Amino acid sequence: MIDPGDRTYPTVVTSTFASTRTQGGLTTVDQITILDNWTTSPDPTLVPYTMVQTETTQRTVSASGPAGAEPTVTVLSRTTTWIVWTVSAFDMPPYQPPQCPGPDGCAYGTIKPNYLCDGMRRETRCAAQCELRDWLWWCRADGGVDAPIGRVCSEGNQTDYKMLLEPCDHTDFKSGCPVCPGYERDWDSYGV
């Protein structure tokens, strides 16, 4: 990891990597470039910080064999918006997936609720911890192609949620866990 304080700002951090796969007589080579445009140093007093990341893939597909056709080159580009946070001692560690610790896979009531979830009468849960890069949490704002990451307001299943765009707290339970019997919240007593 690189300490963000060791860089000069503004800066563009470039990451590149490549992958090759062969299937059915075709060889595909992907050369991927990721650009992180940092206009200012990540200042802990200014979090969260919004980062728009650009990923460009140059894909070359060629036929195997001596008389193969000319390779086909395609350029794919996409942007991803991340909300970047500083690390806190109370964050859920990146190696610890959120759990449903109660009997029969249930979870207890939210220990540190988010006011947005309370306003929606939903439990504050953790879908999966945000990504840890260079001592900063990166929470994907669009939910990504796979699943939401970070804290969510959950209605008790994993398909009905609102992303909070912040790292999970060490007290958060897994999204989708039913609330254990006897731990249901009386929303009316909260005034919401």
Image: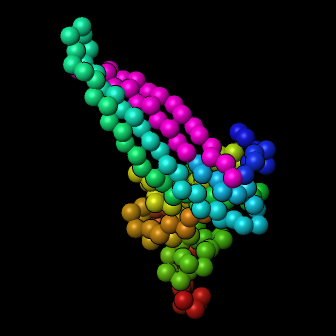
Question: In the rendered image of this protein, does residue 66 appear above or below residue 60?
Answer: above
The percent coordinates of residue 91 (x first, y second) are 69, 57
> Can residue 96 be seen by looking at this rendering?
no
Residue that sits furthest to the top in the current view: 66
Residue 141 x, y percent position in the rendering: 51, 61
136 left or right of 81 in image = right
Up the image or down, 135 lies above or below 161; here it is above
Look at the image and tell me in which quarter the N terminus lies: top right
Q: Give the overall secondary structure of the magenta segment.
A: strand
Which quadrant is the C terminus positioned in?
Answer: bottom right
Up/down of 155 relative to 159, above or below: below
45, 162: nearer the viewer: 45
Q: Residue at x 79, y 49 (%)?
A: 5
Name which quarter of the figure residue 144 lies in: bottom left
Classify residue 134 as left or right of residue 180: right
Image location of residue 122, percent across then percent down: 50, 76
Front position in the image: 104 or 68: 68
Q: Which residues are magenta?
A: 10-35
